[in-house]
Amino acid sequence: MGVKAALPKVELCLYAVVLSLAILWAASWICEASADNASRRSFKQSVKQGWAYIGRKMDVADFEWVMWFTKFRNYILFALSGHVLFGKAISMTVPQYRSMYFMIYGMLAVLATMGLSYLTLILVHCLLLYSIGLAKQKWLCFAAGLCSLATFKFEPVSSWQ
């Protein structure tokens, strides 16, 4: 499936340096947050019992826990069965429609879990990146991808999610 060649050593070193700096930056944030919140007693009242069958604790202030145990709990079976079981069945029976199936399934999964506004946001990002990709300029695609990722943290995009 094409020519297989190793990346240049300079490029690999550059990737390693960038990744190391990103990990160190994230670690500094973690250390700073840990130092700021050293008194753990203040969190005791907001921690409730989590998964009863595993015995984990759940922080009710954490939006991810709340999201998994309210809305996503209703769709997780749909998401897993659609991706694994039906995806394998489509791949074995009609492989020429595999990409179409995963596109439709992905859109339905995002629509069911996140809603129409988030689906529209994702589709706009995909269409924008696809149209920029048609220019076949690597630097432009890279810059557009970074800008696309950055927009998810800006308002009003963040509140739409």
Image (cartoon, rainbow, N blue to C red):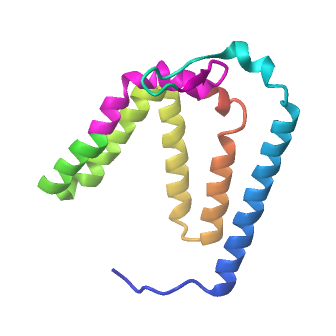
Residue 148 screen position, x and y as percent: 63, 49
> Which quadrant of the structure image shows residue 91?
bottom left
Q: Which residues are magenta?
A: 56-81
Q: Is residue 127 magenta?
A: no
Does 79 sit left or right of 8 as displayed?
left
Residue depicted at 71% across the width and 76% down the height: 14
Q: Is residue 30 above or below residue 111?
A: below
Q: Is residue 60 magenta?
A: yes
Residue depicted at 52% across the width and 85% down the height: 6
Q: As drawn, which residue projects farthest toward the left?
A: 93
Residue 136 screen position, x and y as percent: 54, 70
Q: Is residue 114 above or below residue 8?
A: above
Badge count: 0
The quarter of the rendered structure image containing the C terminus is top right
Does 41 sit left or right of 146 as displayed?
right
Residue 98 screen position, x and y as percent: 24, 53
The quarter of the rendered structure image containing the N terminus is bottom left
Front position in the image: 7 or 53: 53
Residue 89 screen position, x and y as percent: 17, 48
Residue depicted at 55% across the width and 67% down the height: 135
Task: Give the prevailing secondary structure in the magenta stretch.
Answer: helix
Does 44 sit left or right of 95 as displayed?
right
Q: As drawn, which residue projects farthest toward the top?
A: 45
Residue depicted at 12% across the width and 53% down the height: 93
Front position in the image: 51 or 97: 51
Front position in the image: 90 or 24: 24
Q: Is residue 35 above or below residue 70?
A: below
